[in-house]
Amino acid sequence: MPYVREAFSLLGETLIKDGRTITADDVRDAEILAIRSTTKVGREMLEGSRVRFVGTATIGTDHMDKAYMDSAGIKWCYAPGCNANSVSEYFTTALLRLATCHNFSLEGKKIGVIGVGNVGSLVVKKAMTLGMKVLRNDPPKERDEKENEKAEKRRHGNDGKKWYSLDEVLKEADIVTLHVPLTKTGQDATYQMADKRFFEKMKPGCIFFNCARGGVVNTNELLTAMDRKIVSHAVIDTWEGEPVFRTDLLKRVDIGTPHIAGHSFEGKVYGTVMVYQEACRFLGIEATWTPDNLLPPPVVPEIKVDTADLCDEDILWNIVSKVYDIEADDKRLRDGSIDDDKARSAHFDRLRAKYPIRREFRFTRITLNNARPELRRKVSELGFILNQ
């Protein structure tokens, strides 16, 4: 959690611990617990402690026993949307890399976005910027908007249709990307949703992304789908059973990364800010701390590109790959792809804990020489600062 000491030291004495090794003894005398997803929080850790507030600086909550905390009168919070833009930029970079490496155009491709919350909605915008037709699937949101269905259809494109059933998405989409929470109960449970039937319904040759949670995908069925050429290419950031990741799957995917899609520096900082602000509300005090004066300068402040004789997607890949080296993330994970489960999981955790600073697109200025208006629009809509 970047700047966690700076923020929370204003509220009291702070104890900083490795997220995966925090114990009940560590929190026994604490009143506030601030975590990320590597810390499992429930009765075993909290019972008998003085903890009355738990905040996770992540968009997911499957590492928290919320029912227990509610029953014990412990206030909890999470950070929805804190790293949504980071994930959407990871998705954009990976997509452009696939298109460039495999020599296909994204323009006109159909993409199924399963889960259209904070992350998925930004993925939709990025995909539309790249000229793709988006097939949205999100049953809870579709039900919530049913009363305004006619108005929604008028506001959105896609031939007047905003929502698609899962079967429609799998049948029609050239690319499928998952952005759902991990839930095991209820009518919209997502645990193992990408199972045998899911992949069998896919359009043959589909490209598959999982930047959601590892448990959403049945790894064996994904490998079978790849064997059968149902899935032609895959990008996997979240792994079933992580931090122990499957080496057989890593060998098959185009891009494999250690659950870092949301690890832009800003994404992690905003998580800290959101938990700090909620803790202040819980304590009934004013939130005075901000990270504004602490952010480092951009790693890549400016890029100049001569666009003559280059197609838009090659130019965009040239730009985004300079700001975010996704191939380096892939290589680092593969470098620790060894047989020993314990060593492999330790490698996965180290990559997350020591992740290099990755700044978001909006901190880089782009100068385009000889650029068409359409390309300038795309660069701007992807989030970059465009020099006139």
Image (cartoon, rainbow, N blue to C red):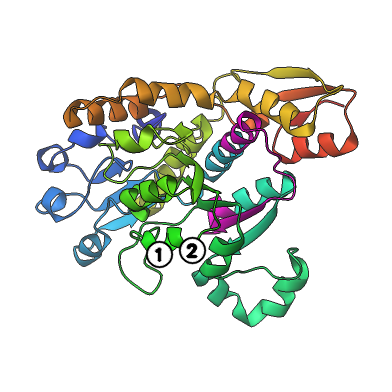
Marks 1/2: CA distance?
Answer: 6 Å
Q: Give x and y (percent) for residue 338.
A: 25, 24
Disc number placed over residue 141 in the picture, else none = none
Q: Give x and y (percent) for residue 70.
A: 25, 64
Q: Is residue 157 above or below residue 342?
A: below
* Residue shown at 27% from the left, 37% from the top: 243
Q: Which residues are magenta?
A: 94-120
- Dot 1: element: helix
Query: Disc 2 marks which amino acid?
Result: Lys
Frontmost residue, 150 versus 237:
237
Query: Disc 1 marks which amino acid?
Result: Arg
Q: Give x and y (percent) for residue 364.
A: 68, 25
Q: Give x and y (percent) for residue 91.
A: 56, 40
Residue behind mark 2: 201
Look at the image and tell me in which quarter the N terminus lies. top left
* Residue shown at 26% from the left, 44% from the top: 241
Q: Is residue 325 above or below residue 258?
A: above
Look at the image and tell me in which quarter the C terminus lies. top right
Residue behind mark 1: 197
Question: With 69 as the anchor, is 122 left or right in this view?
Answer: right
